[in-house]
Image (cartoon, rainbow, N blue to C red):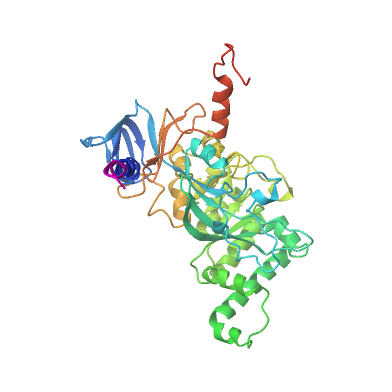
Amino acid sequence: MNAQRIAALLAALLASAPVAAQTIAITNVRILSMGRAGEVERGTLVIRDGRIAALGAGVATPANARVIDGKGGVVTPGFVLADGRMGLMDVSQVPLSVDRAQHNPSLSAAFDVSQGLNPDSAVIPVARLGGITRAILAPEYDDQGGRTLQFAGQAAAVDLGQRADMVMRPRVAMILELGENGAERAGGARGAALVELRATLADVRDYARRRAAYERGQTRDYRLSRADLEALVPVVEGRMPVIVSVDRASDIVEILALAREEKVKIILDGAAEGWRVADRIAQAGVPVILDARLDLPGSFEQLGARNDNAARLFAAGVTIAIKDGEGGSYRARELRYDTGHAVAHGLPYAAALAAITINPARMFGIDDRIGSLDIGKDADVVLWSGDPLEPLSQPGAVFVKGIEQPLTTRQTELRDRYLAKQPWGGTGAP
């Protein structure tokens, strides 16, 4: 290898390697840190080596920094989607592009979505344009052939930057559905689903105590496979929360009681009628993931759905996270619109922004890395042209771990192609 080729290789390495290590200063911005710095009306944020290095009104711009003039815009932490599917589904009607559910009769709780993600999904750049830089990707139920699953599987925390390995932390929560769907899986009655759940937790505790006896075939028969039992051990030990999908107020009360008695950590998902039992949820210290736009019942268990559910839960002292109401994939970018809807119906602005940043990060134990603009945390940063909850505001820059992401998607590429001037003087495809 001659000197010229070596020099070319070194130049290529130097051009690519420092992207994450670049020092970047975003100046002349309003900073909504969601952390210790609070709100800075006009300040500077510095990113160094992929982390937040400094922020505030009196922060000096480092001499070697790339400077981005925010022009009076707004800087926020990257949003965290608490219930996503991007990377698990591309075309819903093409089974081989869908990894959000499985049909193996020996797997339920053990199904781990982190092992089947597609970092090249066309949905991910669209989510980034909505300010989403991290997501909790959760499996779904997909019962076939009359077989039913007790658990959908395990969720994973991921980053939505351009990288082959998007998994930030696998197995952050177990997914369980109760209410109408849970009752149907248990034989048609809500009470049966709760009895089954208690029996399963008892099996897991027995298995955890008697693994050696299980190996020798000296334990009683368990309801689940060994893989499922192992996956549920962190649940009974209090190390993994269970995301419980439930809407009716009476069902919420029942699962709160079960969680207290069984000493299991839970997160309520949905809780359309949560406002009716908000004080009980707050007293139990159980957080809620909700659809802020759900105001019309889609089933009999959602008859009490209303626009101010988020505001009422927050007022009662419940920690909330807002999810998009369209499945967390193709329309996940609408998360900020849904959050703005909650503000319009009584949720304080700061609480709304917390519901898509620091709150979901705390729920899943990843707030040491993300969720707020605090010194030392990963630099997931979005620069907005204006209020991030205002639909007309647009991202001017999106950073994931300090790496600036392209603001292009399949849709924007098609737009630009068909709006481009053609040789004949018009626009559109030839």
Please state the horizontal and vertical placement of residue 136, each as a whole percent of the image.
Answer: 52, 52
Determine whether 136 is above or below 69 in the image: below
Magenta-drawn stretch, dominant element (helix, strand or loop) = helix
Decide whether residue 6 is among the magenta residues: yes
Residue 362 or residue 282, whichever sits in front: 362
Query: Is 168 situated left or right of 258 in this image?
Result: left
Query: Is 100 situated left or right of 17 in this image?
Result: right
Please state the horizontal and vertical placement of residue 192, each as a whole percent of the image.
Answer: 73, 67
Query: Is 108 situated left or right of 136 in this image?
Result: right
Number of marks in picture = 0
Looking at the image, which residue is at 61% across and 65% down?
A: 109
Decide whether residue 303 is among the magenta residues: no
Identify the residue at the far top of this view: 425
Residue 112 or residue 267, whichever sits in front: 112
Residue 230 or residue 63, whichever sits in front: 63
Q: State which quadrant residue 354 falls in.
A: top left
The span shown in magenta is 1-7
Q: State which quadrant residue 297 falls in.
A: top right
Looking at the image, which residue is at 79% across and 60% down?
A: 145
Please state the horizontal and vertical placement of residue 140, each as a whole percent of the image.
Answer: 64, 54
Please state the horizontal and vertical placement of residue 221, each as a whole percent of the image.
Answer: 68, 81
